[in-house]
Image: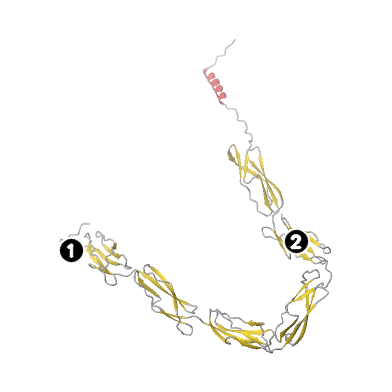
Amino acid sequence: MKVLALTPIVLGILASTVITGCSKKDPEPEKKPQPCEYKITGGNEVNLAIGTAYSKPVVKVMQEKKEITYTTKGSVDSKKLGTYIVTYEGKSCSNKQNYTVKVVPSSCSYKLSGANPLELAFGKKYVEPGFEVKDFNNKVLKESSTGAINSSKEGSYTLTYKGEGCSNTAKRMVKVLAKVVPAACTYTLSGLTADKIALGNTYKDPGVSVRSSKNEIVSDVVKTGIVNSTKAGTYTIEYKGKMCTNSIKRTVKVFAEKCQYTLLGKSTVEMAVGKAYQEPGVVVKGSEGEDIKDTATLGTVNTKKEGSYTLEYKSKLCSNSIKRTVNVVSASCTYTLKGEAHLFVDKGSKFTDPGLVVKDHAGKIVNTTTKGSVDTGKLGDSTLEYNGAGCVNTEKRTVTVALPKCEYKLHGASPLVILKNSTYADPGVDVKDKEGKVIKSKLIGTGAVDTAKLGRYIVSYKIEGCANTQDRIVNVKMPTNEELGNGLLPEN
């Protein structure tokens, strides 16, 4: 057998080919879609009232514990009833998730015109009073009604109203009353059967009540006849109930009678504004001396407003009247304070109210009460309010309790001049109260003097219990050659 001889170069190429071929990887198989978990806030189904804006839910798509992106297909028409499907599909997911949105009718508000329940007379045609339907956006909707009324048959009927797209309805009960056969009724007159009024007075009909043969109230009553109160005579008023075979009459006599009025109290009364008016009253007698009790008072007195008011007393049985004048005058008083309206007193001192003089609208001095007090042991403002007897107004005074002012006497000069880099020693101060007594309370001084710096300094003194303070001015200046003595400036 013939053996081939391979050169080193050929061997190298073969070796390289074998090694390279062994290092190549096989292509990875294509990754298959995996199941995903869909998390939808609120669940996979929701009901949406028609007309309500659709809000997309929060959706998370998880695959192998990682949130991935997704696509959405489908839409929702919230203005149209129906069931809508929105599909969510995650990227590289083997499954999808449907989200169901049901657009359902909404609850509406109904406003029925007329009575409910409604009574309908037997045989009378039913006329719908009307109704209105609004949705939750307060929009008026188209409506429809179901049900029928048979007015020729006694009984109760139901009408049902429904608005377009509404989940609820409204109902009206209609009661057809029993057929009424005309019969004699029972009449009861209010007031007198034979009434009378004085000439010139307005006649007010007291009225009548009517019941049917079945003792039911008859509300439909026709009244005929008038009373001419401007002309003396006898007038007749007739009342007749519907479906009644009978009627009833009232006579009204208009007569001219002049009565005698006697005012109790004065015919002209003067009173202060703000006070209650007390009516003295009036006595009325007829032409034959009989007492007449039915007397009306016309007019009012506004006790809160100044002015002249007229009250008229008149009986309906009399052709004449009488009047009273009530003058409402000012009840404001004049206050004259003794001393200032704003007083200042020292803390701890005794306060004595200077007082005042109060006069009413007629200039008469009236007694005064004082509301409030002054505690001189406490700093601050107090209010004293004065009220005159029978006065609608008041007066006030303010009393301020403050610390007293003290007298400070400085030792040494102010301004005080000292030389730069010298030592400042405060000369001190004496303090006395307003009675001249030395105050030995602790003295507080504020402010510092830096003698190393030229300038103007202020030292303030204050003692406890005093309202005021005292200042001292200290000027730090450069010494002159004469003040130095040797002509040299001090070291900085």
Q: Quadrant of residue 335?
A: bottom left
Label 1 or label 2, whichever comes before in sequence order:
2
Q: Residue at x 81, y 76 (%)?
A: 247
Query: Which amino acid type is marked by label 2?
Result: Arg
Residue 194 at what x, y percent from top left? 75, 82
Tag 2 residue: 172
Q: Disc number at residue 483? A: 1
Picture layout, residue 363 above or below residue 21 = below
Labels in figure, total: 2
Residue 263 at what x, y percent from top left? 60, 87
Q: Quadrant of residue 11?
A: top right
Picture layout, residue 150 above or below residue 269 = above
Quarter of the figure that contains the N terminus = top right
Pick the residue in front: 35 or 178. Answer: 178
Horizontally, residue 350 falls left or right of residue 96, namely left
* Label 2 residue SS: strand
Q: Residue at x 31, y 65 (%)?
A: 464
